Image (spheres, rainbow, N blue to C red):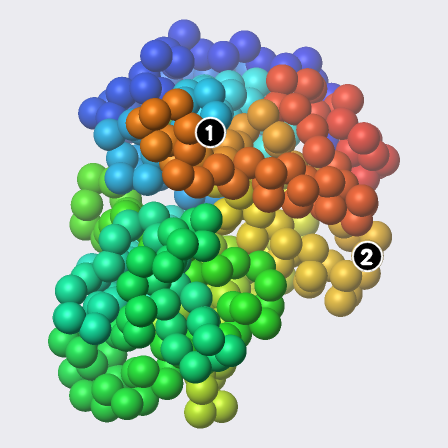
Amino acid sequence: MTTRQQLQVPSFFDGQNAGKWVYRPDLTHLFDESQAWKGRYGVKPSAIDRFRLHLLLIDVQKDFCYPEGTLYVGGRSGKGAIEDNVRISEFIYRELPKISEITTTFDTHFAYQIFFPWFWVDRDGKSLSQHTMIRIHDNGRRLVNILPDGTVLKDDVKPNPAIASWVCEGNYTWLEKQAFFYCQELAKGGKYTLYLWPPHCILGSDGHALSGVVHEARQFHSFVRGNQSWGEVKGTHPLTENYSVLSPEVLMRWDGKPLAQKNARFIKTLLSEGAVVIAGQAASHCVRSSIDDLLGEILAKDPELAKKVYIMQDCMSSVVVPDGKGGYIADFTPQAEESLAKFQAAGMYVVDSTDPVESWPELKKLAA
């Protein structure tokens, strides 16, 4: 890894664009700018990097990154993802010769998924509401719809019968068993209760696209360093959540057959890199879950590998849902803070993007 002084952020970058839903870069102009930049600073192709630093950006998509999005991650400040994306972009430009590869994940959904309200119906056949949860009740005999504070809204909720024809070849009894088993598995795992989110990152929608300034920065990096702008798709299976890019929440069906599988190829890629830097949205959910799964793979292989992971705490925010009265319907900030402490205790490093990477703990030793 070169110890070259940090580069200046290019003149075309405007942080104000991080708050503009409609902003999108002109890639032809960006390529021309990148070639001039490459010549000016003498930046070499990433293929010859002796030490590989991999930047993993989790779900920096429009629906999460703008107030116009259906699931804006504003954090407690209300400006979370917008300000995070400015810092992410500036980090890429300043540290561009040191970043070998950038992978962006794409949360990718369709109309009916187990975490959307209309996947479910109450006893009257009506769809459920956003920002509520499904939980096993009465000693495991039925599923109920509750508020985040535990208040029961609807008794005896079930999967929507209309979807059985394509999700399980019309076998509605199988679907009921699978839905109940899924909630059992979530409870057993202890990570999440099934939360019903607003529709977000629907494939084909504007909200599925990356934030314009982050897309601009990752493409500029790709053009300068001659490396592909890789992406990892997650979340398309209708019967499981997929917060983590490395694995869905539940891997098995109620009948013992496989439901989904881990992203073994990408796990192998991350474990083989010289260092992995992680940022994105949301700290309380998809970032948290991805790092948690990565840590699990590290502990199974070699706990010392945790020292190769750097978490940019100033480039991620937590899901906070305001109630319009000065309070919150839900605030997942404590869960994110608890997880950061856990990851740090396991040997991962929590860092700030504004500090030069050479100053990050152990990085010089890793690159030596």
Residue at image location 35% in from the left, 20% down from the top? 18
- Report whether residue 224 is seen: no
The mark lying in front, picked from 2 and 1, is 1
Depth check: 128 or 245 in front? 128
Q: Earlier in the sequence, mark 2 or mark 1?
A: 1
- x and y percent of residue 178 in the render? 38, 82
Disc assigned to residue 194: none
Disc 2: which residue = 303
Residue at image location 32% in from the left, 19% down from the top? 19
In the displayed structure, 89 sits above or below 158; it is above
Disc 1: which residue = 75
The amino acid type found where label 1 is placed reads: Gly
Dividing the picture into quadrants, the one containing residue 52 is top right
The amino acid type found where label 2 is placed reads: Pro
Asked whether the residues under the numbered discs 2 and 1 touch, taking CB atoms below 8 Å apart as contact, a structural biologist would say: no
Question: Which SS class for mark 2?
Answer: helix
Depth check: 27 or 284 in front? 284
Q: Is residue 270 left or right of residue 261?
A: right
- x and y percent of residue 279 in the render? 55, 36
